Amino acid sequence: MNDKQDLQTVAVNYGVASNKEFGAIIPPLYLSSTYEMEEFGKKGAYDYGRSGNPNRSLLAEALAKLEGGARSVITSSGMAAVDLVLALLEPGDMVVAPHDCYGGTYRLLSARAAKKHIDVTFINFYEDHFESRLPKSIKLFLIETPTNPLLRLIDIAKISGLAKRYGAWLAVDNTFLSPALQRPLSFGADFAIHSTTKLINGHSDVVGGAVICADAAHHEKLLWWANCTGVTGSPFDSYLTLRGLRTLHVRANQQQATASFLAGQISEKNLAKIYYPGLTSHADHALMLRQQQGPGFMLSFEMAGGISAVKKFLKKLHIIKLAQSLGGTESLICHPATMTHAAMPEAVRHQAGITDGLLRLSVGLEAPQDLLQDLLAGFSE
Ligand code: PLP
């Protein structure tokens, strides 16, 4: 393969026409849980489905190429991917994470810390001089950018420099953008993490995850742990996710364009307080221009009347569905306080700015005008 190919071409073509047996254009699905030994004591490329599978390998190679990493590991969910990176740590190792990280990540880190598997400090990365509040010793910075659900941005290059000073690793959860819109390893991160459940698969029919490693030695350790604990992704999920990946760039670009249009309309019409990095009024707009290939397909807004206003708004929607996930072809709306961030203690949630009136919108591929009409109906008295 030509290494200079645009990443969109890589996503569309990776593994296409690689089938030697029948010349199948689309790589076949290998469901077999086990593989015949070449001879006594000598295994072939694959031996057992938990340890390796051709569909999983193709997806892993494609994602490593898109993120600019050495290798990657495909996991059974995004949470399994986050937890897999934690497998590199020893008891007493300190993890620093954003105080407004995804609720599931908050729960995982807190539960592992409660069991003394690791130590954790949650930091408000947007405060001036947050560096002075960091613990003395750190082994892993585990950040998300943009954050879920307030879409604040963290400067990856800056945290990478900080991590190097601490002798720590930097892992960036890139779920909210995908490599089509942001490539954390190019800013010095050691790991990019994905819930491939979201934009990468893009069709809301797979739960999966991935860790892309800058360093092949890390990959070997992660692959060992993924096989040891059995969190590797399934063949069918890998097959579907590679199919979703083919259209990643066109979906990302179109969904982003529609999100920009809707955010502009909500802001111009003064319908609600809006959080979208594409707006010049957004606190991290300048960083977005430096770090991302566009503002993304997620936006959040605040209903002034709290829970009762939220309930009224949601009842008036017809196209946009109330559901947890994001990044699919269909637009989904979510109430973080009672859904994605319900695992966060109320006080921590409020401190992170996730109020009862906040709604998060994942913009899909519907016609922009239809989505606007739906939102306007929601906002109407
Ligand atoms: N990371 C982020 C930013 C997420 O939004 C999610 C899920 O919403 C996850 C990780 C977890 O992924 P999964 O649900 O595939 O386990």
Image: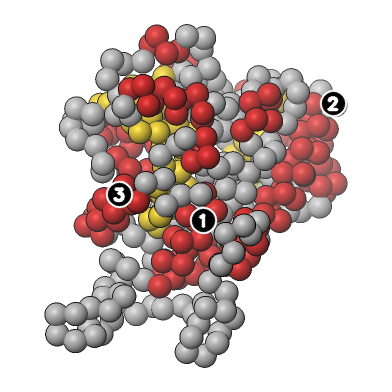
Does label 3 or label 1 sit earlier along the sequence? 1
Query: Which residue in the structure is indicated by mark 2?
Result: 268
**Which structural element holds mark 2?**
helix
Tell me the number on the disc at residue 65. 1
Q: Is residue 98 visible?
A: no
Does label 2 or label 1 sit earlier along the sequence? 1
Query: Which residue in the structure is indicated by mark 3?
Result: 217
Horizontal relation, residue 166 to residue 7: left or right: left
Q: Say which quadrant the C terminus sits in.
A: top right
| Residue at x 52%, y 44% (from the top left corner) | 175
- Say which of 102 and 74 sits in front: 74
Residue 274 image position (x, y, % from top left)? 70, 26
Residue 7 image position (x, y, % from top left)? 62, 55
| Residue at x 53%, y 65% (from the top left corner) | 242
Say which amino acid is labelled 1: Lys
Vertical placement of residue 301 versus 191, above or below: above
Say which amino acid is labelled 2: Glu
The residue at the far bottom in this view is 22
Horizontal relation, residue 150 to residue 56: left or right: right
Q: Mark 3 and mark 2: span between their CA atoms? A: 50 Å
Callout 2: few (<14), some (14-19), or many (20+) C-alpha neighbours within 10 Å? few
- Say which of 298 and 351 sits in front: 298
On whether ligand 1 comes within 8 Å of the CB at mark 2, the answer is no
Vertical placement of residue 86 versus 113, above or below: below
Q: Mark 2 and mark 1: span between their CA atoms? A: 40 Å
| Residue at x 63%, y 65% (from the top left corner) | 12
